[in-house]
Image (spheres, grey):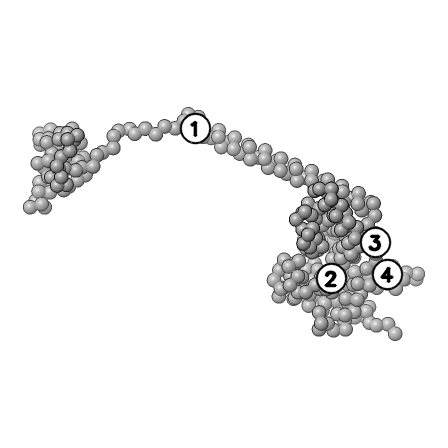
């Protein structure tokens, strides 16, 4: 403000000189208090409406959720990892049964191409899928050889 | 708000009312009723934050609220202000004092500025604020505030040159 030119100085003086003292009258005080009351009411209404909307939103959300509790149950046992005593090189555990159902043998062979046919106890005469099993196992043999 | 704080608020308002009202009047370009509305609304907002700002700078808070509210209202132009080619003659003839005539001319000239220019000029030359505080009150960068002020002064210079020539 030090580099003010004469016009700017006169402008500043004019702005200050035109200030006329105005007392803070009771009507001003009343109006101010009324304004505070109105604003307080407005804020309260706004807050109440906000809470109500939140409750309604939560209620709608709960309604849209299925009524019964959701249970997660496995439809069938998970396929066990196809491991064999020879492929892993470890001795069979006492709890394991050496035989497996014929249906699972195909899965087992497909899931683990590295398994040898000597480990699968089921014979090739069971189902139509056994041809695939045999082909796969023979191929695996060729690879192993 | 507690009773003691309410008392402090009342004291502050009573002490600063006149200055705040004059500031509001300059910010709105002279309309006394709009200035009173602006001052009242800003003080109502101050009431709700008084416990937080009373120890720091309550007047700076009111000033910022006032400037931004005036700028918003100016952008809306709800009171139908329109720039004119020539200043209206007004009713300052005869027995009206020179002070009133001078004030009226100043307010009429301020009314022709954009809201931001008016606020920048008023804060700079009436409130004597540094550019940084003007920018903070306007909510814009310092360069923008400086630009508003310089353009506003240039426009006022053009309008008021005759009016504030020193009388001999």
Distance of label 2 from label 4 (alpha carbons): 21 Å
Q: Position of residue A140 (x, y in %)?
A: 11, 42
Mark 2 sits on what residue?
A: B127
In terms of secondary structure, where does tag 2 sit? loop
Proximity of marks 1 and 4: CB atoms separated by less than 8 Å: no
Of circles 3 and 4, the one toward us is 3
Q: Residues within 10 Å of mark 4 (few under 14, many from 20)?
A: few
Numbered disc 3: secondary structure? loop
CB atoms of marks 3 and 2 within 8 Å: no
Name the residue that disc number 1 marks: A66
Q: Position of residue B145 (x, y in %)?
A: 65, 63
Q: Residue at x 52, y 33 (%)?
A: A58
In the drawing, what numbered circle is on residue B100? 4
Quarter assignment of residue A44: top right
- Asked whether residue B87 appears in the rendered view, the answer is no
Which residue is found at the position 93% from the left and 61% from the top? B95
Residue B78, compared with residue A125, is above or below; it is below
Q: Where is the N terminus of chain B found, in terms of image quarters?
A: top right
Q: Residue furthest top?
A: A68
Q: Are marks 2 and 1 in contact (CB under 8 Å)?
A: no
Q: Residue at x 77, y 70 (%)?
A: A9
Q: At 22% from the left edge and 34% from the top edge, which residue is drawn? A: A79
Is tag 2's residue or tag 4's residue first in the polypeptide sequence?
A: 4
Q: Nearer the viewer, mark 1 or mark 3?
A: 3
Chain letter of the residue beneath label 1 in the structure image: A
Of residues A53 and B12, which is closer to you in this image? B12
């Amino acid at each position: 403000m030090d580099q003010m030119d004469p016009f700017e100085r006169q402008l500043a003086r004019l702005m200050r000189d035109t200030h006329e003292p105005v007392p803070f009258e009771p009507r001003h005080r009343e109006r101010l208090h009324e304004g505070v009351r109105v604003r307080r009411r407005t804020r309260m209404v706004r807050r109440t409406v906000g809470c109500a909307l939140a409750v309604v939103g939560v209620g709608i959300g709960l309604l849209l959720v299925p009524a019964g509790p959701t249970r997660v149950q496995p439809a069938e046992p998970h396929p066990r990892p196809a491991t064999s005593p020879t492929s892993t090189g470890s001795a069979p555990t006492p709890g394991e049964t050496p035989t497996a159902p014929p249906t699972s043998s195909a899965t087992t062979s497909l899931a683990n191409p590295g398994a040898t046919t000597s480990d699968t106890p089921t014979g090739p005469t069971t189902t139509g899928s056994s041809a695939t099993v045999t082909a796969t196992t023979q191929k695996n043999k060729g690879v192993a050889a | 708000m507690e009773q003691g704080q309410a008392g402090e608020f009342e004291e502050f308002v009573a002490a600063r009312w006149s200055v705040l009202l004059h500031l509001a009047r300059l910010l709105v370009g002279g309309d006394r009723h709009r200035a009173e509305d602006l001052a009242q609304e800003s003080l109502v907002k101050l009431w709700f934050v008084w416990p937080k700002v009373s120890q720091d700078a309550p007047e700076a808070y009111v000033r910022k609220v006032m400037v931004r509210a005036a700028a918003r209202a100016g952008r809306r132009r709800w009171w139908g202000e329109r720039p004119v080619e020539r200043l209206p003659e007004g009713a300052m003839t005869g027995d009206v004092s020179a002070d009133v005539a001078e004030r009226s001319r100043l307010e009429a000239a301020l009314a022709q500025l954009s809201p931001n220019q008016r606020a920048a000029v008023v804060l700079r030359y009436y409130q004597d604020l540094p550019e940084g505080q003007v920018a903070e009150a306007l909510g814009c960068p310092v360069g923008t505030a400086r630009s508003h002020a310089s353009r506003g002064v240039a426009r006022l210079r053009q309008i008021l040159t005759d009016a504030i020539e020193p009388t001999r």
